[in-house]
Image: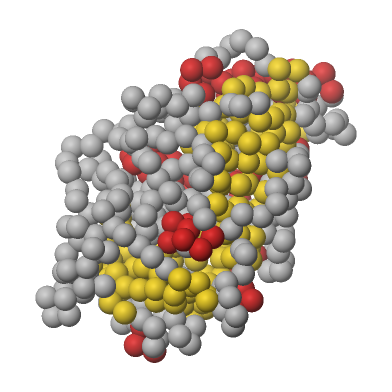
Amino acid sequence: MAPHKRMFFTLLLLSFSASTTNATRPPATLRIPVVHRDAVFPPPPGASRGSLRAAADAARYAALMASLGLLRSSAHDDRLHSPVMSGLPFDSGEYFASVGVGTPSTSALLVIDTGSDLIWLQCKPCRHCHRQMSLLYDPKGSSTYSQIPCSSPRCFPHQGCDSSTGACGYAMVYGDGSASRGNLATDRLVFSNDTSVDSVVIGCGHDNEGLFDSSAGVLGVGRGTGSLATQVAPTYGLYFAYCLGDRTSVARSSASYLVFGRTPEPPSTAFTPLLSNPRRPNLYYVNMAGFSVGGERVAGGFSNASLSLDPTTGRGGMVVDSGTSISRLPRDAYAALRDAFDARAAAGGMRRLARGISVFDACYELRGAGVPGVVLHFAGGADVALPPENYFVPEQGGKYHCLALEATDDGLSVLGNVLQQGFRVVFDVEKERIGFAPKGC
């Protein structure tokens, strides 16, 4: 990633509105089926899942860091940037939604991303487009497509203007050097049960490069004004939830989902306050209060301050992120959790390997031993007991298992989608809280 790339969104000056329609009246919720990327784009035979996943995650994490200004930058860049890591060719853990675009609708497979505030997809005519599995969207074939002129308040500032058409341009530059450029427009999005949302602002990408191979684009559900979550808020409120299902399943039919609109919450839902980081207000932050291993709270060996957000510096706290696979903790907190896990694992009969595998430094031969339990404690008394498969993952064909966490020294912790697997994760922006309900799919 070039040192001058800084990831800031400039969406706050925009005013978006979208209306929802179906044959009668809008349903109470907008539900979108979700599948894991491996169900659609299986990794090549013989590929190392761990190493490929780690490569993609590392680039995404670096982009999140840059978005917070925690990496050094030597120049200013006025283009619209995003922290999304375009790791589709890798086993990087993305989950996808199939969305219809236009009238008649063209099916597009989009990466669901809580760190992005723009919905964009590849469009005809393509000057530079990567290969995608579905048909290219042709705006000329949609009766509901409308370009956004440069004079519109929906046009991003400093994004350029097409002198021949007067269309507002956009440029998305990603953490790994991938990019999408094109024009902003509005069109109809079609979801399950023929529910549609009219006049959604989208990016129509005509010049796309990098590692977005196979997908059609990105479905941004961040906290910014241009995300789908915000655009459908007049109908469904500032509330959505998802459940990310079994990442090891290759079945295209999935219990995973993304749903907009308030629904009854399971009694088991544990809520923690949703925080805002002034350095990156479109991300979803929470504070961790600690963790337990094997039924005992881990006390000492780490600073609680590193798990809490400092709004002044932008450091600390934990980002709940749909696009990162591997969760990251401050180095002292990670070491305390790992050492407690290691002691319990050894007492139970596991053998720890002398060397780690891929990015994981705590890997074991099970020898029939049970897996020590792990509970994450969040601010506000939210305790989240993790299933073993969420933090203890198989490597080398299941011969060994590794503690699926990484240490970071950079002031940014991430709750990745492997730890979130199987939970209904509620993003209740209206009540400023995030919830976790087990067995939510």
Quadrant in which the N terminus is drawn: top left
Q: In screen coordinates, is 350 left or right of 224?
A: right
Q: Residue furthest left?
A: 163
Q: Residue furthest front?
A: 25
Q: In screen coordinates, is 27 left or right of 163?
A: right
Total numbered labels: 0
The quarter of the picture where residue 395 lies is top right
Is residue 99 in sight in this rendering?
yes
Q: Point out residue 66 in the picture as x, y percentages from the top left corner.
A: 33, 39
Q: Point out residue 249 in the picture as x, y percentages from the top left corner.
A: 72, 59
Q: Point out residue 114 in the picture as x, y percentages from the top left corner.
A: 48, 50
Is residue 32 in sight in this rendering?
no
Residue occupying image coordinates x 31% and y 45%: 7
Residue occupying image coordinates x 27% and y 64%: 154
As rendered, which of 347 and 25 lies closer to the eye? 25
Q: Point out residue 176 in the picture as x, y percentages from the top left corner.
A: 36, 51
397, above or below 34, in the image: above
The quarter of the picture where residue 218 lies is bottom left
Residue occupying image coordinates x 70% and y 48%: 265
As rendered, which of 355 and 253 lies closer to the eye? 253
Q: In screen coordinates, is 326 left or right of 382?
A: left
